[in-house]
Amino acid sequence: MQLSVIICCHNPRIDYLGRVLEALKAQTLSTGNWELLLVDNASEGSVAASYNISWHPNARHVREENLGLTCARLRGIAEASADLLVFVDDDNVLAENYLDVATQIATDWRCLGAWGGQQLAEFEGGEPREVWKRDFWTARLVRDIWSNNYDRQAAPVGAGMCIRRIVGERYARAAKASNLRVALDRRGTSLDSAGDIDMAFTACDLGFGTGKFAALSLTHLIPNRRLSDDYLFRLIEGIAYSEAIVLAVRGNPPLKISRVDRLVELYKSLRIDKLERRTARAWALGRTRALNTWRATQQSGVRGE
């Protein structure tokens, strides 16, 4: 078995997950070389009852009752049998050669422990009028990038992320030992969102690098609700919070902003447009929440690292 494909889902859209599975069914890599794990994370209805994956000879439905994307990923890691794990969200339509390319990268780039590719967004109802919303969801690559440092630019996101088993197992041990890390990603209505970065950075913890490759391509299906201002600014706040916590558990806790720095930021905010101002505010709110959470964790002695 060359790789394990892990799909984590919670109340998935029938049409979206259907397209995800059809894209996997069309992969150029023979099904005899990979397994498929469909992890149902406490969905209201049974995913196993709604989706037939018997077309794949090495496919299994798995039910994880603990709500949260991190919990679902940890279950997937525990259930997987291959040395290469590929995480596919329930709205990711992979290019037909995705798994082939992923396995080739695993062979050619043995220095990397986690990698991903580029994402092309498909918007429900057509592209949004606001360019920034289109760009927010689209991650095109003009060249391959990689780094053996904790480099956010080279770290793959969860959509289509490929990691070596040794990285997954190390991440699972660290996450299970830390309440903060388990709560890093989506859970119910929460939009905290850096569990994938924590997983990618675990490759660096082990001395591997991370990378992104243009040859790895997927289409991210974006529903209308993810284009509302409220959703996007809450998401930006969640990302800011989560990324600060990821750095904190690695020895770089968030710092309190000084009074002088606050005045400087206030002055800058008066000279930028409304979009930049709202983005900066959402980012600042996330950072402040991270600082408060980290302080409370350290004071209470709750498992944080």
Image: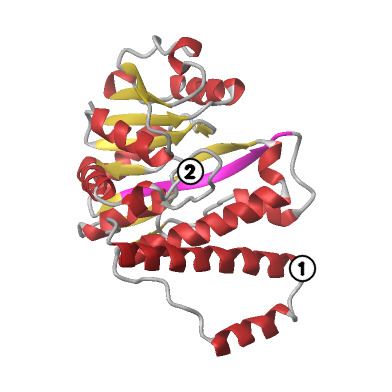
Please report the residue visible at 57 percent of the width from the left and 69 percent of the height from the top.
284
Q: Can you see residue 214?
A: no
Indicate the amino acid at tag 2. Answer: Arg
Is residue 135 or residue 248 the one in the foreground?
248
Q: Is residue 154 above or below residue 124?
A: below
Residue 172 image position (x, y, % from top left) = 25, 44
Give the vertical position of 38 relative to 243 (above or below): above
Residue nearest the viewer, comparing 289 with 158: 289
Q: What's the residue at 52%, 54% (across, down)?
A: 141
Q: Position of residue 6 (x, y in %)?
A: 37, 31
Location of the N terminus by quadrant is top left
Q: Is residue 117 magenta?
A: yes
Q: Which residue is mark 2?
A: 186
Question: In terms of secondary structure, what is the magenta stretch mainly?
Answer: strand
Where in the figure is residue 280, as x and y percent of width and height? 63, 69
Left or right side of 104 for 186: right
* Extreme residue in the bottom direction: 260
Q: Determine the CA span between mark 2 and mark 1.
A: 28 Å
Q: Is residue 75 visible from the viewing direction of this image?
A: yes
**Residue in the image at 27% along x and 54% along y:** 203
For residue 77: magenta? no
Figure quadrant of residue 272: bottom right
Q: Which residue is mark 1?
A: 274
119 w.r.t. 60: above or below = below
> Disc 1 on helix, strand or loop?
helix
Residue type (three-letter) at the residue carrying disc 1:
Lys
Magenta range: 114-124
